[in-house]
Amino acid sequence: MKKIAGKICSVILAVVMSCTMMGLSTKAAYVDVTAVKQQKTNWCWAACAQMSAMIACPAYYHNQSQIVTYIFGSTYNYAANIYQAAMGASYGSCYYRTFSSTSSPLSFSQINAKLTAGYPVQAGMVHYSGSTPDGGHMLEIYQTYSIFSINYVLLVDPYDGSRGTLSYNYLLNTGPSGYKYEETVY
């Protein structure tokens, strides 16, 4: 029985090593994120700011209510623009890290580099009705990998705290429920 188990383990190891050496599957980058659900309907940005803050400064960070109060002066159910979301993440981490924002998506290699350096990435998703933007949502990207030359991102949706995997191209060009990745906090 030990010989059979040993042979099975050897075969599995050989297959994994072969796939890795042939470039069929690679784990590119990862940060350890604790999924957080948004506390109010427009607080996806605050939940992502809290998740990023928990990575940047796990010993002490601000929660969603504190982040929203810092940005808006109260806990009203406000959405935030990309600049406010970056300010919220910086405040959330007690300025242990200063987060930046851009009104464009990062490339897959840029996301990979940020995660490799230990920085989480927040994807600002914009929803369109025809060609007119009419809403947004923020997602927390915590891992990247490639299989058969297709790039994937693993993310947390703060709407319900769920985790998911999407191809980078899908996130960028189509996106879930008509939302497209167009802004970034990093």
Image (tube, grey):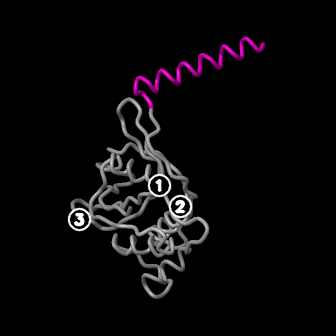
Count of numbered marks: 3
In the picture, the quarter occupied by the C terminus is bottom left
Give the labeled residue for mark 3. Answer: 132
Q: Where is residue 26, by image quadrant?
A: top left
Q: Is residue 3 magenta?
A: yes
Residues under labels 1 and 2: Cα distance?
8 Å
Relative placement, left or right, of 158 versus 110 is: right
Amino acid type indicated by mark 3: Thr
> Residue 39, percent across and down?
55, 72
Q: Which is more N-terminal, label 2 or label 3?
A: 2
Q: Which residue corresponds to the image point at 46% horizontal and 24% vertical from the top-left?
A: 19
Mark 3: secondary structure:
strand
What span is colored magenta in the figure?
1-25
Q: Is residue 142 magenta?
A: no
Q: Residues within 10 Å of mark 2 (few under 14, many from 20)?
A: many
| Dominant secondary structure of the residues highlighted in magenta in the image | helix
Mark toward the viewer: 3 or 2: 2
Q: Where is residue 161, by image quadrant?
A: bottom right
Residue 59 position (above or below residue 6): below
> Residue 40, percent across and down?
52, 73
Residues under labels 3 and 1: Cα distance?
35 Å
Q: Which is more N-terminal, label 1 or label 3?
A: 1
- Seen from this angle, which residue lies furthest bottom? 73
Give the labeled residue for mark 2. Answer: 55
Amino acid type indicated by mark 2: Ile
Label for residue 118? 1
